[in-house]
Image (cartoon, rainbow, N blue to C red):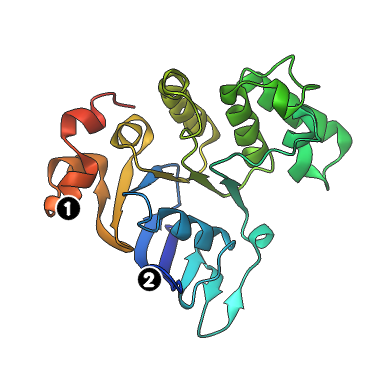
Amino acid sequence: MTRFLDADIERHFAAGPTIEAAFRQSVAMFSVTALIGPSGCGKTTVLRCLAGLDCQQRGHIAFGNEVWFDAEKRINRRPQQRGIGYLFQEYALFPHLTVFDNIAFGLARTAKAEVRQRVDELLKMLQLSGLASRYPHQLSGGQQQRVALARTVAPRPRLLLLDEPLSALDAPTRSELRGQLRDLLTAWAIPTIIVTHDPAEVGAFADEVIVLSNGRIRQQGSVQLVFDQPVDTEVARIVGSRRDGISEGK
């Protein structure tokens, strides 16, 4: 039976737009879905509601046969009960912990030998070998991003939520890591939802795209469909031209 992530999110803010986003996404196999839209349109709010970090006022969220949130039934699973990995836009590394301890943070209930094996595996995969004893302030921006990503996937989550994972990097580093990120996500084979405002990033690593504007979903579909056949001028403006958005490929 195919598993889906079913989300119907309604989040109200005292000063700001109401976010209303309903979508259904297969999580039976690996795919990357990009949430794209202008700043303030609700992308991060949707991600935080999925993670259980933000509480919506109405709606529901289900992952397969598990109900994560249901406003009417007063169900609200805590983030650690949802089995998700969440990468914050600012990475949120612990400054007092080494690279090794940052990556191992979510493995507290794992045997020491397994922790060492898992961390070493991720250090090698993410080209961080030799940096295990360093602290975040001793790393470049690209290295910090990879440490944060390693910490996110270390517990082997069922769903990855990445909030603008490349936005804190300078342009050359961002361009370099674009293709690497898709390769890593493919290797891990974890269904992923990525927030971005950059059409080039959508083309580099997404399979599906959800376009948001003013707190509403305007279009959802394959990258090819949305970029080639935007439903209206607003979507066309957000995704930009096909050449700018998907020429880099995956």
Q: Residues within 10 Å of mark 2 (few under 14, many from 20)?
A: some
Per the image, the residue denoted by label 2 is: 18
Q: Residue at the far front: name it.
A: 15
- Where does residue 232 sit, x and y in percent of width and height? 12, 54
At mark 1, the secondary structure is helix
- Where does residue 141 sit, x and y in percent of width and height? 58, 25
Q: Using the image, determine if residue 206 lies above or below residue 128.
A: below
What residue do we see at 35% from left, 57% from top?
41
Choose between 59 and 143: the one closer to the eye.
143
Count of marks, rendered view: 2
- Where does residue 93 sit, x and y in percent of width and height? 69, 38
Q: Toward which corner of the image does residue 83 lie, by quadrant?
A: bottom right
What residue do we see at 58% from left, 48% from top?
86
Per the image, the residue denoted by label 1 is: 234
At mark 2, the secondary structure is loop
Mark 2 or mark 1, earlier in chain: 2
Q: Three-letter amino acid code at disc 2? A: Thr
Q: In the rendering, which numbered label is found on residue 164?
A: none
